[in-house]
Image (cartoon, rainbow, N blue to C red):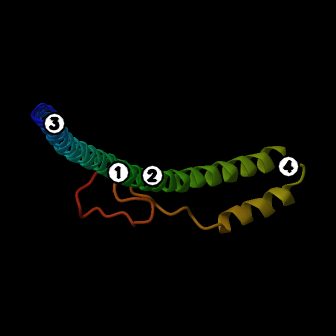
């Protein structure tokens, strides 16, 4: 029986050695899993930080573009207002010139080409009764009366 007991003991030692080997392997694998979890977590945190930084960068860039677009829109609105003001000035001046030219053309037409003196007299009377064009100052604008006290030429 001693041989059987020694075989059993030897078998038990082998079994214990295998168990210990498997426990060591299990511990090593658990440590690897923990390391992988930690590295994965660190990678996820890094990726999240990079994504956040990227989003913040894009947000800054979009804000800069928005500010630039707003500045351009404001500038364009100011330029449009200036152009409208100039257009109104020119329209007033051109309307006056046009009225004066129409007056002179019609007067000339009826004086020279009128068949009867009565037509010419009627139109002469009509054109004399029209109000004069408002005087305009080139420096002060079409609506302002001329002011010589400011020392500007042609005011």
Q: Residue 70 at what x, y percent from top left?
A: 36, 53
- Specify whether residue 138 is in view: no
Q: Nearer the viewer, mark 4 or mark 1?
A: 1
Q: Position of residue 25 (x, y in %)?
A: 17, 35
CA separation, marks 2 and 1? 21 Å
Residue at label 3? Answer: 8
How dense is the environment of label 4, judged by Cα within 10 Å: few (below 14), some, or many (20 and up)?
few
Q: Which-is-in-front pick, marks 1 and 3?
A: 3
Please identify the residue farthest to the right as the structure is shown.
Answer: 115
Identified at 12% across, 37% down, the residue is: 5
Of callouts 4 and 1, the N-terminal one: 1
Q: Which residue is mark 2?
A: 80
Q: Which mark is residue 114?
A: 4
**Which sits earlier in the primary sequence, circle 3 or circle 2?**
3
Q: Nearer the viewer, mark 2 or mark 1?
A: 1
Closest to the observer, 18 or 93 = 18
Q: CA distance from mark 4 to mark 1?
A: 67 Å
Question: Viewer-proximal residue, 24 or 129?
Answer: 24
**Residue 12 left/right relative to 54:** left
| Secondary element type, mark 2 | helix
Which is closer to the viewer, label 3 or label 2?
3
Say which element carries label 4: loop
Instruction: Report helix, strand or loop for mark 3.
Output: helix
Quadrant of the image containing the N terminus: top left
Disc nearer the start of the sequence (2/1): 1
Q: CA distance from mark 3 to mark 2?
A: 105 Å
Q: Quadrant of residue 150?
A: bottom left
Picture coordinates of residue 4 (x, y %)? 16, 34
Which residue occupies the foreground of this view, 141 or 108? 141
């Amino acid at each position: 029986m001693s041989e059987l007991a020694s075989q059993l003991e030897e078998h038990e030692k082998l079994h214990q050695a295998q168990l210990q080997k498997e426990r060591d392997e299990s511990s090593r694998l658990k440590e690897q899993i923990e390391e992988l979890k930690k590295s994965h977590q660190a990678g996820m945190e890094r990726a999240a930080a990079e994504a956040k930084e990227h989003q913040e960068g894009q947000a800054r860039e979009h804000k800069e573009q928005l500010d630039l677009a707003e500045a351009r829109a404001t500038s364009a609105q100011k330029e449009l207002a200036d152009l409208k003001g100039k257009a109104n000035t020119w329209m007033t001046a051109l309307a006056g010139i046009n009225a004066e030219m129409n007056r002179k053309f019609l007067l000339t037409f009826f004086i020279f080409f009128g068949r009867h003196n009565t037509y010419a007299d009627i139109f002469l009377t009509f054109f004399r009764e029209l109000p004069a064009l408002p005087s305009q100052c080139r420096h002060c604008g079409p609506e302002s009366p001329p002011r010589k006290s400011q020392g500007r030429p042609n005011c």
